């Protein structure tokens, strides 16, 4: 019998992205002959079945009135040892269709077929679906279309046309990631700094040009200049806390530290046209024993031979109540000076000057940005002014898991390193990129919300830890998250 060749073109009408949402696998586009086309070919794992669907386009096929053509999808294992035939599509001419209705189908196909009559010269197609018992080897099977183009029922003359090869299921194509939307609240922020302001001995008048004061004052004014000039920022509170060294009587240091802190506060208030309510009353710690302890802890016995003994004296003082410290501080300093005179002089020259400092705290609020366009503009120019929720809004304008989206999520965590929502959302990026170690690290700081539990489940799925994954999904579902797709992923991947 004359060998007949036909071209079967496999056309993909859907996208890999759509397929990934259901676990469906699409075959690679290829074309080999002309009168019949198979398009929208999909192979979908569903529960315990493998479902094959395709559209058989017959527009160019001509079938003689007394003949038929048969098309049978076939799955063949990668090593060719396993073959499963599926339901056959019988396309009959007019007279042959009558014969089949009267005498029954050709015995070769009678057990499993669907029949249709071909109307030559007219557009015509058939949407095909069949399901067979799922086998492990289906994951990497070759998909063929067996074509009986002579209608003679002789399997030896049939054409086997290769449609494509399936690939093993990629867990990332099956799972669903859930981001956590941060709360929209935009809180006030605080900025802390330290300036080492010099004062004339036993005086507290603020002298901007005295010694290194001009440089130290710029630490405060440079920050405030930027804030006051920025229409997005409102300065709500400025508080200055002064510290004196343990030298001199405690009562004298109390007066000195308090007045110096207030003098600096007054100087800053006079420089800026801010409401008086912004400037909090100055605070002071008369003697900076905490700073002295920290400095001695960092020293070694070469610098300070009796380091440990001096440290014990300081620590014992700091263990006392504040009123006890006030009564015993002078005696404590005198003891160090008396027992370790050389080391006291060393501390007096090298450490005490740094204990006399002014800490400042600026509380400010950045206004809320109301539109996505405004958030995007600030993201590009002043990202530090965005709240975590505003970073979230910026990310929603971007293609998920694109480079710019991923950068936005990373930037959000950089500015809000303690935020659980930022850790969850960046962990999802890491999971999508296959970086399991980074995802695991981020999830240790992500809390136990539904999105975090879902992300932990996905991490377990990628590691084939399906029992642990199911437990995390139970936790996420208990908080109202739909985890159906990830449960289905476990079912498919654990077979």
Image (cartoon, rainbow, N blue to C red):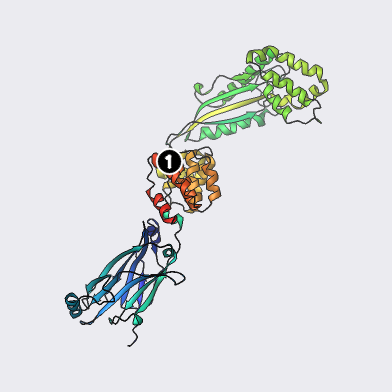
Image quarter for residue 252? top right
Image quarter for residue 196? top right
Could you classify mark 1 by the number of other residues whose Cα lies within 10 Å: few (under 14), some (14-19), or many (20 or more)?
Answer: some
What residue lies at 56% left-to-right and 33% top-to-bottom?
Answer: 225
Label 1 sits on a secondary structure element that is helix
Q: Does 84 sit left or right of 221 as displayed? A: left
**Residue situated in front as seen by the camera: 208 or 331:** 331
Quarter of the image where the N terminus is located: bottom left
Name the residue at the right extreme.
342
**Residue situated in front as seen by the camera: 22 or 343:** 22
Q: Position of residue 482 (x, y in %)?
A: 37, 45
Answer yes or no: is residue 390 visible.
yes
What residue lies at 75% left-to-right and 30% top-to-bottom?
Answer: 299
Quarter of the image where the C terminus is located: bottom left
Residue 378 to residue 94: above or below: above
Name the residue at the bottom extreme.
1
Q: Does 401 sit left or right of 94 as displayed? A: right
Q: Where is residue 128 in the image (x, y as percent from the top left)?
A: 29, 67
Q: Position of residue 165 (x, y in %)?
A: 43, 68
**Residue situated in front as seen by the camera: 469 or 340:** 469
**Residue situated in front as seen by the camera: 178 or 248:** 178
Residue identifier under label 1: 475
What residue lies at 47% left-to-right and 71% top-to-bottom?
Answer: 79
């Amino acid at each position: 019998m004359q060998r007949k060749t036909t071209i079967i073109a496999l056309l993909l009408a859907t996208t890999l992205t759509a397929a990934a949402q259901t676990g469906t696998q699409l075959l690679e586009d290829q074309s080999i002959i002309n009168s019949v086309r198979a398009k929208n070919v999909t192979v979908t794992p569903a529960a315990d079945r493998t479902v094959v669907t395709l559209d058989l386009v017959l527009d160019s096929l001509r079938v003689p009135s007394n003949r038929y053509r048969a098309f049978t999808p076939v799955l063949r294992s990668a090593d060719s040892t396993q073959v499963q035939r599926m339901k056959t599509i019988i396309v009959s001419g007019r007279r042959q269709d009558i014969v089949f209705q009267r005498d029954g189908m050709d015995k070769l196909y009678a057990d499993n077929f669907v029949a249709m009559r071909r109307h030559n010269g007219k557009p015509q197609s058939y949407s095909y679906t069949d399901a067979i018992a799922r086998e492990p080897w289906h994951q990497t099977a070759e998909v063929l279309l067996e074509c009986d183009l002579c209608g003679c029922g002789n399997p030896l003359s049939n054409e086997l046309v290769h449609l494509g090869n399936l690939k093993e299921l990629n867990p990332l194509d099956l799972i669903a990631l859930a981001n956590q939307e941060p709360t929209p609240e935009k809180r006030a922020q605080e900025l802390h700094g330290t300036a080492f302001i010099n004062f004339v001995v036993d005086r507290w008048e603020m002298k901007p040009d005295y010694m290194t004061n001009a440089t130290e004052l710029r630490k405060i004014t440079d920050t405030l200049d930027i804030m006051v000039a920025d229409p997005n920022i409102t300065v709500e509170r400025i508080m200055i806390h002064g510290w004196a060294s343990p030298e001199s009587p405690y009562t004298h240091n109390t007066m000195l530290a308090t007045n110096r802190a207030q003098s600096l506060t007054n100087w800053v208030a006079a420089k800026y046209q801010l409401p008086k309510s912004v400037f909090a009353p100055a605070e002071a710690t008369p003697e900076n024993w905490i700073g002295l302890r920290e400095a001695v802890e960092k020293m070694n016995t070469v610098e300070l031979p009796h380091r440990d003994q001096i440290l014990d004296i300081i620590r014992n003082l700091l263990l006392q109540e504040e009123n006890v410290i006030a009564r015993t501080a002078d005696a404590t300093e005198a003891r160090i000076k008396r027992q370790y005179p050389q080391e006291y002089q060393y501390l007096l020259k090298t450490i005490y000057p740094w204990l006399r400092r002014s800490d400042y705290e600026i509380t400010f609020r950045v206004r809320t940005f109301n539109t996505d366009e405004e958030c995007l503009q600030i993201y590009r120019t002043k990202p530090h002014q965005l709240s975590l929720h505003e970073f979230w809004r910026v990310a929603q304008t971007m293609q998920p898991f694109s480079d710019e989206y991923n950068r936005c999520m990373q930037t959000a965590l950089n500015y809000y390193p303690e935020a659980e929502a930022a850790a969850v959302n960046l962990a999802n990026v890491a999971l999508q990129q296959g970086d399991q170690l980074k995802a695991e690290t981020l999830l240790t700081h992500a809390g136990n919300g539904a999105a975090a539990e879902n992300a932990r489940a996905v991490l377990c799925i990628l590691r084939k830890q399906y029992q642990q994954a199911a437990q995390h999904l139970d936790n996420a579902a208990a908080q109202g998250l739909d985890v159906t797709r990830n449960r289905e992923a476990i079912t498919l991947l654990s077979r």
